[in-house]
Image: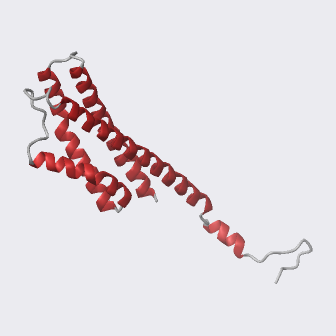
């Protein structure tokens, strides 16, 4: 139980927070570009700075869920990982400065969908973290210690001093 709790607390929770923050920042930059608060070159360079680390983090989280046997989390994250892999292989993962206004709405919708998925994954992670913590505490409370076993193994005596059969 301890390793599972460590997996959810130390690995999954911070990774999900980082992916959620990165995607939220990208949506924010695209909204600023749409409102003309930032120029296209700055927007593309700021978004492209986070694309590869996000892809690597998402792929590592998906692979880690696969190798540790967390099938539900793996099945929840594998579609985005496959889509990231497809974009990377086709060399469409970076935003082009000259075409940023043409693909602005599509990129914004794509990142909002990823934001919703990462939020769902974060909620599932918090639920799993809480459930593993509660079950590990419950297991510790209900576990039988050696002193408790020795007390149960001694014959019970009645108030008059006779032992029960």
Q: How is the image coloured?
A: secondary structure
152 up-or-down from 77: above or below: below
114 up-or-down from 78: above or below: above
Residue drawn at (88%, 79%), measured in percent from left and top? 162
Task: Give the farthest residue toward the bottom.
Answer: 165
Percent of width and height locating residue 157: 84, 75
Q: Quadrant of residue 66?
A: bottom left
Report the number of discs.
0
Left or right of 53, for residue 18: right
Residue 48 can be seen, yes or no? yes
Left or right of 159, for residue 68: left
Percent of width and height locating residue 81: 23, 50
Task: Give the farthest residue toward the right.
Answer: 160
Residue drawn at (7%, 26%), measured in percent from left and top? 98
Left or right of 51, for residue 14: right
The residue closer to the viewer here, 161 or 27, is 27
Task: Give the farthest residue toward the top.
Answer: 37
70 up-or-down from 150: above or below: above
Residue drawn at (18%, 37%), measured in percent from left and top? 51
Percent of width and height locating residue 39: 15, 18
Which quadrant is home to the C terminus? bottom right
The residue closer to the viewer here, 149 or 117, is 117
Residue drawn at (16%, 50%), measured in percent from left and top? 85
Residue 70 can be seen, yes or no? no
Left or right of 146, for residue 88: left
């Amino acid at each position: 139980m301890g390793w599972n709790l460590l997996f959810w607390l130390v690995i999954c929770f911070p990774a999900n927070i980082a992916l959620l923050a990165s995607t939220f920042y990208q949506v924010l930059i695209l909204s600023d570009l749409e409102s003309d608060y930032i120029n296209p070159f700055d927007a593309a360079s700021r978004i492209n700075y986070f694309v590869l680390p996000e892809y690597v983090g998402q792929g590592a989280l998906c692979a880690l869920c696969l190798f540790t046997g967390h099938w539900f989390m793996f099945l929840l994250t594998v579609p985005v990982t496959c889509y990231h892999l497809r974009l990377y292989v086709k060399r469409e993962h970076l935003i082009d400065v000259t075409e940023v206004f043409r693909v602005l709405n599509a990129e914004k919708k794509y990142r909002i969908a990823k934001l919703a998925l990462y939020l769902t994954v974060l909620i599932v992670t918090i639920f799993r973290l809480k459930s593993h913590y509660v079950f590990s505490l419950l297991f510790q409370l209900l576990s039988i210690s050696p002193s408790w076993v020795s007390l149960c193994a001694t014959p019970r005596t009645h108030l008059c001093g006779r032992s029960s059969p």
